[in-house]
Image (cartoon, rainbow, N blue to C red):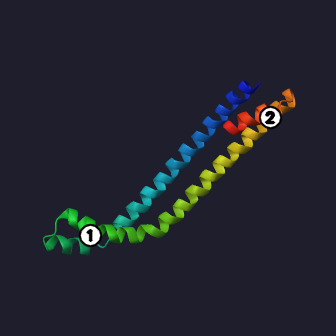
Amino acid sequence: QCQDFCRVSLTELSKVNEKLVGNRKGHGRVTAEIIRGALQSVPHGQIEAALACGISRWTVLRWIVAPITLRYVSPAYSTEAVLLVKSTALASLVTVWDVTGVAQQIIQRTYRTMEVFICAAAI
């Protein structure tokens, strides 16, 4: 009976993986937009002035563009990181409820509480 439980739980686990991958893809899109917006908000005059002074593009990116971009990215990305952690925790919580619910159904059929909960804990 425990084998049936493990098979059902693996199906539930794949559903959670789908949720997590979809969640990551959505947050990745938002993060890309945050970074794109921060890069576009760097004043173009500062970049032009640095290039006119003879500074290489790599040095302009490293010492002028990157610090300004990080200043603009920090508030929005910190909020996005908090939302990512919250949504990941919610997806894992749904899984625990699903696994526990299936375990309860198997216990009602087989009356083997310890074996079923040990399998549930392993998952």
Element at label 2: helix
Q: Is residue 69 above or below residue 99?
A: below
Q: Amino acid at mark 2?
A: Met
User: What is the number of the mark on residue 114?
Assistant: 2
Q: Residues within 10 Å of mark 2 (few under 14, many from 20)?
A: few
The residue that appears at 19% across and 73% down in the rendered structure is: 50
Q: Quadrant of the C terminus?
A: top right
Q: Is residue 99 left or right of residue 39?
A: right
At which x and y percent is residue 41?
A: 36, 70
Q: Residues within 10 Å of mark 1 (few under 14, many from 20)?
A: few
Q: CA distance from mark 2 to mark 1?
A: 61 Å
Residue closest to the far left: 54
The residue that appears at 41% across and 70% down in the rendered structure is: 72
Indicate which disc, 2 or 1, sits on the residue closer to the N terminus.
Answer: 1
Q: Quadrant of the N terminus?
A: top right
Q: Nearer the viewer, mark 2 or mark 1?
A: 2
The residue that appears at 81% across and 36% down in the rendered structure is: 104
Q: Is residue 101 above or below residue 30?
A: above
Residue at mark 1: 63
Image quadrant in which you'd find residue 9: top right
Element at label 1: helix
